[in-house]
Image (cartoon, rainbow, N blue to C red):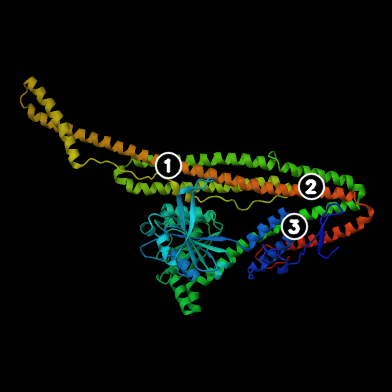
Amino acid sequence: MLPGSVRVAGPPSCATISYDMTSSPEHTPPSIKVDDVASSDPRTAAAAEALASGVRAATAYGRADLAGRLQTAHDRLVEPDVNVVVIGEFKQGKSSFVNGLLNSQVCPVDDDIATAVPTTVRHGPERRAFSLVALSDAFETTDALPAVERREIEFADISAHATEQRKAVHPELDVRSVDIELDRRLLEAGLVIVDTPGVGGLGSAHATAALGALSVADAAVFLSDASQEYTRTEMAFLKQALDMCPHVTCVLTKIDFYPAWRKVLELNEGHLRAIGYNLPVVPTSSSLRIEALKRNDKQLNTDSGFPQLVSHLRNEVVGGAAEREQSHARAELLAVCDQLIGHFEAELRAINDPEARADLMNQLAEATERSQQLKSQSAKWSVTLNDGVADLTADVEHDFRERVRTVLAESDEAIDNSDPAQTWSEFEPWLANRMSHEVVANYRLLTDRSAELSAEVSEHFRIAGGGVLERLDLGDAGAVLNRVGAGASANFDRSSTLMQGMTVLKGSYSGILMFTMLGGMLAVPGIGALAVGIGLAMGRKGLKDEKARQLTQRRQQAKTQIRKYTDEVSFQVTKDARDNLRRSQRQLRDHYSTRAEELHRSTSDALNAAKQAAQTDERDRGTRLRDIEAELERLRTLRTRADRLVIGSNGSDER
C-alpha cells in the first residue's frame, strides 16, 4: 500500500485513495489557505491547520458531508466578522472617534449635521465606499423586506449618503446604511466598526435601532464626552446595553477640551459601580490621536488614550471572538474524527474478534436504527423544536400585546389629563420612543427564548453527538420600525377667538330672546335687563360646554391616532417576529437534520464495513488489518491534535 494512502472500507476491489494529512500549504485544497490565518495568533493557525488536515481526511474517505462541515468551521475561523457597535448620545464624537481609531476620515464629522444611517467600516484591499439603498418596488418573497442594492459611491459623497443631508441631496434614495472598506491593520483580523446614527440622541427611535444592533453585535463601545458626568438617559441606555451585549467598553471622549475630565471620569466609574458593573472608563481624545499620527509622535499618541483602546479591542474583543471560533473548530473536528474512527474500529473488531461479531452487528444495527429515527419528524428533538417554536410564537405575540396594552393605558391617562392640541408635540416623540423600547424588549424575549430552545433541542440530540447551534440569524429590533407606515402625527382643530365669540353670542341671543318673549307675555317690568344678564350667563355656559365638547373630540381623535399607530407597529412587529422564528426553526432543523444524516451515514458505513470484514478471507485479513491500524493511528493522531487545541487566555496552544 502506498505511504499516506487509505483504502476505503468496502469490497476487496475498492479503489485506494491517496491523501496527505500533513499541514504543508502545497497539499492544502484550494479552498483552504492556511496562510490566511493571522500569524499573531498561533492558536488560530494551529486550529486552521488541523481543520485543513481534517478536510483532506474526510474527502479522502469519501465523506464530502463531513469535509463540508469542517470547511465551514475553517472559513469562520480564518475570516471572522467581529462586529463592534459605537453608540452614544447625540454629538458625543462617535464619528470622530471612528476616524481617530482608524486614522482615516471615513465617517462624516460636522458640528450641525449628525449621522443618520449606520456606517460600517470593514477591511478591504483598497479604499471603497458603498451605499445600501432599499428598492421600494422589489421585495424578497421570504421575509417581505425591501430588496437592498449595494451601490458604489465616491469617498467624497459619503456625507451625502450617511448624514441628515441625504434627504436634501438624494431625496429619491432610501439609504439604509453605508458600507466602507479600508485597508487597515486593525481591521485585518475581522474587526468591523459600526458607527450608529446620532439623530435625536438616546431618547429617540434611533437609540432603539442601536439597541437592536447590540443584540447581534460581538461588542460595543459606549461614548460620552468629558463635559459632564453620565446623565439619567445615558445611564438608562447604558444599563440596557450592558444587559444585551456580551462586551461593552466605556470611553470618555474630548478630554483635551475639558480640563476637569478626571473628575468626570471618576464620577462615571462610580455610576457604573452603583448599577453593579465595575468597569473602567477609557479616556480618549480624537484630536490628539489625529495630530499624533500626523507628527508621528508616540508620546502624544499615548496621551490620546487610543493605544490602550486598540490593545483592548485586539486582545479582548477580537481575541474573545477568536477563542469562540477556536472552540467551535475544536468541537467540530473532534466530532468528525470520532465518526471516522468509529468506522474503522467497527471493522477492526469484526476482524479481530469473530466470537463477538454477532453482538457487534446487533449494536451497529441498533445504532443505525437510532440514527434513522433521528432523521424522522417523530424524533424527540424535532418534536421539541416544532412545539417550542409554536409555543414561543404565541408567547412572543402575547408579550407584545400586553406591552401595547400598557402603553395604551399610559397614553389614555396622559390624553385624558391634557389637551392634545397643546401637548401633542411632546407626546408624539414620547409615544414613538416608548413603543420603540417595547419593541426592543420584545425582541430580547424572542432572542433569549430562542437560545433556550436551541439548547433544549441540543440536549435531546446530545446522545447522538449533536452540538449546539451557536448563531441564530435573528433580525434587528430597530429595523422593523422603519416599515411602520402610519405615523403618530395628528392635527387637532381648535376654536378661534371669533368662533368662541360666535358661540357666546349664539347662547346669549337664545337666552335673551327666550326671557324677553316670556316677560312680554307676562307684562313684567324691567324684564329686558334681566333677560340680557341671563342670556350672557347662558352664553358663557354654552361656550364652556362647546369647549368641553371640542376637548373631548380632540382627545378621542388623539386616542384614535394612537391606536392606529400602535396597530401598525403591532402588525409589523408580529410579522417580523414570526419571520424570525421561522428562520430560527429552519436553521435549527437544517443543522440537526444534517447532523442526523451524518450520523446515519457513519453508522450505516460502519455496519457495512463490519459485514464485509466478516466475509474477508484469511489471505486478505492480515493486509486489511495493517491498513486499518495505520488509518486508525493517523486519525487518532489528528484527534489528539484537535484535543490539544487549548481555548483559554494563557496564550498556550498545548495542554
List the residue tagged with mark 3: 58
Q: How many marks?
A: 3
Where does residue 432 sit, x and y in percent of width and height? 40, 48
Where does residue 211 sit, x and y in percent of width and height? 49, 54
List the residue tagged with mark 2: 604
Residue 91 showing in the rendered view? no
Residue 29 shown left or right of residue 150 in the figure: right
In the image, 263 versus 165, the foreground residue is 165
Contact, CB < 8 Å: mark 1 with mark 2?
Answer: no
Where does residue 605 sit, x and y in percent of width and height? 80, 49
Q: Which of marks 2 and 3 is nearer the N terminus?
A: 3
Foreground label between 3 and 1:
3
Which residue reaches farthest top?
522
Q: Which residue is drawn at 75% across and 63% down?
A: 641
Q: Which of marks 3 and 1 is nearer the N terminus?
A: 3
List the residue tagged with mark 1: 566
Q: Residue at x 92, y 49 (%)?
A: 354
> Which element is circle 1 on?
helix
Task: Residue 531: name its quadrant.
Answer: top left
Tag 1: amino acid: Thr
Where does residue 370 sit, x and y in percent of width and height? 76, 43
